[in-house]
């Protein structure tokens, strides 16, 4: 594996696993003394950095996060003194396995992510290696410029990683690969040489001289054996050493951290058309789409992306409520063709020209110029890598043969033969990709768990390599070789080129300490497979059903493939609130998933359910469920946290909040039987500082939190006594004409905000429903579920299902007012009681208040009219993840309310989370990201609509304004 010592181990288990706590202790101490950045040799950090987005696993010796170039030099000197390998990494979204190794991982994303300068005249930007691609693009926007390469991970991948992999992206048709956009690199070798490489060819010194000499010597072989292909990424860029074409900076692009460490990079910026449009072309199948890319290329578009019908079918099966795919024209294969212009009209005209030129070949076409619709369409394409890793029934698919490229004029023929290779090996794959450059992305249902399956994987990879070479292509067209394909390089290049690669690496890194075992003298494609090295040692007997993972918690821990959408600096939708505050890997969905995977494996995280590393990571998980919808592979960390807590505290003393907040419905039921005067007394006592302090201490509640006041009388109690409720609005519908409807009287609405239920009943009655209440108290069990009290949650839910069973059996619709409870009935119930027949009825019969009202939008609009004020809308996380918000938007429009839906993510309270001692600061920081600033900046006349009790409580306790529920807005609008 190395040039100077056969004794240096390179596999994850041999070096990184056994020696880390002993032989590397001195290394750790020396690094701490030498650098100002973080030094992490703990089990948790090593577990989180043990995998990237590939099939591979390599436990690092340790992880360091240098703060500047001086830190990098100092760290390299320490590693050199200890003779340990080094691996520079960025966002770790690599798909070929080049970002995992038994080495000291240098994390550049944490601190060295600055954009040092932008020169609009020279059209360049100088950045540190950890700078995110989108941040560089944003820096160029004020000048009408952008960074051309844009992989699907553009909002999180780093420039250093892009340089390492020679990344491309969807706009390579117009702007090329990363190598085509690099101007200058400042690098550091393992031996401590600091070199500036540029395109002038004036670099001096032993390394530049040796590289030029190598280029002169192999020029003939390069001309004969290195294909001139726009998407050739495999191997080193020897063509950049050939006399007359020498560019040492470009030669270093695509070396995957095996030669030197980048300290800074100057990259080219290109003119970005101010307006874009999208021509979406439909074809009979993906083959015909591929056959016609050369005709599309003649139109000089910015992008030519392709999708197969399998991707759309998977999307619709995995996300039944998804509507974006309905924008696609008729066909079973599609091309996205993006055009640009000075104005939207100009861009759309260019897109229409593409449609006109392709009319004879397509089954349909649409031109999309509206920005939001284009973003929605691009999301389908960009999330393909994640979507295709799981089938709706829980089947697994893997990268490996991920991004091969052939000349685009041969792409259709290649696809047809590729499908035959799949079939001959008994494999299935769904593909999409950069069709305009002949680059295919595919996820394949390899069996990587068994020896015969791994042999089949090897056989397929060899056959696929031979096929792509036969078409004059490259094993990698974007993601690099890594562990996945480097073993196959001799099938693409003759021995003399392979020898030249070794010489190239030797010039830069004669000690073979920079990311060893990649590209040159590589590990084989079936070494270090993540699922093989990570075979679980824990029993797989989960307490939840894990229905989407075939009843297996271990299978669930493999769901995260590391695409890193949860670790986006500029916000990542609803997931993950704590990551957005702390920027700590252990608080990202990916970091938590890695820890759980390693916990099941037992090599690094050795104490299973009692692991403090996992507990610490999950402590700041808000169980918001944002990852379940926002993560492309549907990682459901809320369920994983429930499973962890259930096992960690099985037959053990639990945290105080599990008894107080976790059993809150039980305590509130006890309070609910008290007379109103007694409840008033309790509320007054809760405001007495000393008593409140004692109560909060006993319940594990943060001292800075206020105890919410309890309603003097619940809605159900008032209804039972026949008290007058909100006046029913006259909607012109005969009373009871639409039959019975059961209102789910959740704990939070009933005990804290009963007026919401009163208004909801009035509106529903006005719509002609005969509103009924459950015969006794009901509860979805969510507070017990989220605190891992699964047995109690099952018991509570089963009791509630018995209470509403007759209504369910009769097909009576059930309406929920609290989003978290409604979502729990629709989704969590199946995890708690998978064999309960009535659980299936919940999915079809339970709806949100908005979903029911949306069926009567025309009636609402006729009565409410227009001009009924404005509202900021805070969507509850569980609603976002499980239910969606389109009905809410439709109802507000029908009610004549000017609604602005906040893109604020979780409010930060998240049930018991924000109350629990130690969580207050993170809870409020989540709220301050977007929600509270938006509320403060809104005019006082603008209502804050928050259907979730947690959301309302967070805003109330922040002292901003009194939020309202959709039922209250609807009631007011319909009452005039």
Image: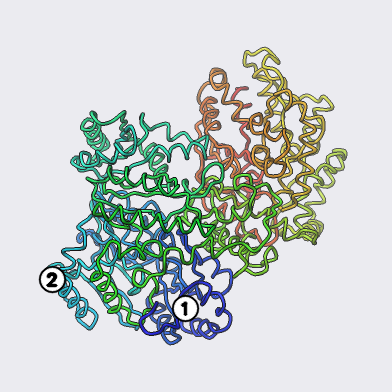
Residue 31 in the image: x percent, y percent? 48, 82
Label 1, label 2: how many angstroms apart (C-alpha)? 38 Å
Task: Identify the residue shown where x is 72% and y is 34%.
Answer: 837
In the displayed structure image, the side of residue 404 where residue 379 appears, left or right: right
The quarter of the image holding the N terminus is: bottom left
Residue 4 in the image: x percent, y percent? 37, 84
Give the residue at mark 1. 9
Instruction: Judge whether 203 appears above or below 460 on screen.
Output: below
Circle 1 residues within 10 Å: few <14, some 14–19, many ≥20: some
Residues at circles 1 and 2 in contact by the CB criterion of under 8 Å? no
Residue 243 badge: 2
Circle 2 residues within 10 Å: few <14, some 14–19, many ≥20: some
In the displayed structure image, the side of residue 256 where residue 39 appears, left or right: right
| Closest to the observer, 832 or 45 | 832
| Closest to the observer, 461 or 266 | 461
Residue 243 in the image: x percent, y percent? 13, 71
Residue 415 in the image: x percent, y percent? 32, 44
What SS does tag 1 mark? Answer: loop
Instruction: Judge whether 257 appears above or below 445 on screen.
Output: below
Q: Quadrant of residue 822?
A: top right
């Amino acid at each position: 594996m190395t040039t100077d010592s056969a004794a240096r181990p390179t596999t994850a288990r041999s070096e990184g696993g056994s020696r880390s706590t002993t032989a590397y202790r001195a290394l750790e101490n020396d690094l701490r003394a030498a650098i100002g950045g973080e030094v992490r040799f703990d089990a948790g950090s090593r577990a989180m950095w043990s995998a990237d987005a590939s099939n591979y696993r390599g436990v690092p010796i340790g992880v360091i996060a240098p703060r500047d170039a001086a830190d990098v030099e100092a760290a390299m000197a320490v590693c050199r003194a200890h003779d340990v390998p080094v691996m520079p990494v960025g966002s770790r979204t690599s798909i070929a396995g080049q970002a995992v190794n038994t080495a000291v991982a240098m994390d550049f994303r944490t601190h060295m992510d600055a954009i040092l300068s932008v020169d609009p005249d020279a059209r360049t930007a100088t950045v540190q290696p950890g700078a995110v691609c989108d941040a560089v693009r944003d820096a160029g926007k004020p000048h009408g410029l952008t960074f051309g390469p844009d992989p699907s991970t553009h909002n999180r991948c780093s420039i250093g990683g892009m340089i390492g992999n020679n990344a491309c992206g969807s706009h390579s048709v117009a702007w090329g690969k990363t190598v085509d956009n690099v101007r200058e690199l400042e690098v550091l070798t393992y031996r401590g040489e600091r070199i500036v490489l540029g395109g002038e060819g004036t670099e001096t010194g032993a390394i530049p001289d040796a590289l030029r000499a190598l280029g002169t010597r192999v020029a003939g072989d390069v001309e004969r054996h290195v294909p001139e292909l726009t998407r050739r990424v495999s191997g080193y860029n020897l063509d950049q050493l050939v006399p007359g074409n020498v560019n040492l900076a470009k030669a270093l692009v695509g070396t995957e951290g095996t030669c030197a460490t980048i300290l800074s990079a100057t990259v080219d910026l290109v003119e970005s058309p101010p307006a874009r449009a999208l021509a979406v072309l439909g074809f009979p199948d993906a083959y015909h789409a591929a056959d016609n890319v050369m005709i599309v290329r003649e139109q000089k578009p910015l992008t030519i992306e392709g999708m197969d019908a399998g991707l759309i079918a998977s999307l619709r099966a995995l996300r039944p409520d998804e509507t974006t795919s309905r924008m696609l024209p008729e066909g079973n294969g599609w091309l996205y063709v993006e055009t640009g212009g000075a104005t939207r009209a100009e861009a759309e005209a260019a897109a229409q020209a593409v449609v006109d030129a392709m009319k004879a070949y397509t089954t349909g076409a649409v031109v999309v110029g509206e920005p939001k619709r284009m973003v929605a369409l691009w999301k389908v394409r960009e999330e393909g890598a994640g979507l295709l890793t799981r089938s709706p029934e829980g089947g697994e698919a893997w990268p490996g043969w991920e991004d091969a490229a052939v000349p685009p004029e041969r792409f259709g023929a290649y696809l047809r033969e590729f499908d035959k290779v799949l079939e001959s090996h008994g494999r299935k794959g769904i593909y999409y990709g950069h069709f305009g450059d002949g680059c295919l992305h595919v996820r394949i249902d390899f069996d990587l768990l068994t020896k015969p399956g791994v042999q089949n994987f090897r056989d397929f990879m060899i056959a696929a390599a031979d096929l792509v070479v036969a078409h004059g292509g490259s094993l990698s067209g974007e993601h690099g070789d890594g562990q996945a394909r480097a073993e196959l390089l001799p099938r693409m290049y003759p021995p003399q080129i392979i020898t030249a690669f070794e010489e190239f690496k030797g010039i830069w890194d004669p000690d073979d300490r920079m990311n060893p075992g990649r590209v040159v003298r590589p590990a084989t494609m079936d070494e270090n497979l993540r699922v093989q090295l990570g075979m679980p040692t824990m029993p797989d007997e989960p307490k939840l059903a894990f229905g989407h993972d075939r009843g297996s918690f271990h299978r669930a821990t493999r769901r995260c493939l590391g695409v890193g959408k949860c670790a986006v600096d500029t916000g990542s939708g609803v997931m993950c609130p704590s990551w957005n505050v702390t920027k700590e890997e252990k608080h990202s969905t990916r970091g938590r998933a890695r820890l759980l995977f390693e916990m099941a494996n037992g090599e690094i995280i050795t104490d299973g359910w009692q692991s403090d590393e996992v507990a610490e990571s999950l402590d700041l998980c808000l169980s918001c469920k944002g990852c379940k919808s926002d993560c492309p592979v549907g990682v459901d960390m809320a369920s994983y946290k429930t499973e962890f807590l259930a096992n960690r505290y099985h037959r053990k003393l639990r945290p105080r909040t599990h008894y107080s907040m976790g059993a809150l419905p039980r305590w509130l039921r006890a309070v609910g039987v008290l007379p109103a005067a007694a409840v008033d007394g309790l509320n007054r006592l809760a405001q007495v500082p000393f008593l409140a302090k004692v109560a909060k201490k006993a319940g594990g509640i943060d001292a800075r939190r206020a105890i919410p006041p309890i309603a003097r009388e619940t809605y159900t109690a008032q209804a039972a006594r026949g008290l007058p409720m909100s006046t029913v609005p006259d909607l012109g519908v005969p009373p009871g004409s639409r039959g019975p409807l059961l209102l789910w009287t959740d704990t939070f609405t009933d005990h804290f905000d009963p007026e919401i239920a009163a208004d909801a009943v009035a509106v529903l009655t006005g719509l002609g429903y005969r509103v009924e209440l459950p015969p006794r108290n009901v509860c979805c069990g969510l507070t017990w579920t989220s605190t891992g009290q699964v047995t109690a949650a099952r018991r509570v839910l089963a009791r509630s299902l018995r209470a509403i069973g007759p209504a369910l059996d009769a097909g009576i619709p059930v309406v929920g007012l609290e989003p978290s409870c409604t979502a729990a009935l629709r989704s969590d119930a199946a995890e708690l009681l998978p064999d309960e027949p009535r659980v299936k009825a919940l999915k079809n019969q339970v709806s949100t208040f908005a979903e029911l009202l949306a069926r009567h939008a025309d009636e609402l609009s006729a009565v409410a009219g227009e001009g009924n004020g404005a509202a900021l809308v805070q969507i509850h996380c569980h609603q976002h993840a499980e239910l969606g918000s389109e009905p809410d938007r439709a109802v507000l429009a029908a009610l004549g309310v000017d609604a602005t839906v906040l893109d604020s993510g979780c409010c930060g309270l998240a049930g018991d989370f924000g109350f629990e001692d130690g969580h207050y600061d993170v809870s409020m920081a989540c709220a301050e990201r977007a929600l509270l600033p938006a509320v403060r900046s809104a005019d006082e006349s603008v209502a804050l609509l928050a259907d979730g009790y947690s959301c309302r409580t967070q805003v109330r306790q922040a002292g901003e304004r009194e939020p309202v529920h959709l039922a209250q807005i609807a009631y007011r609008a319909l009452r005039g």
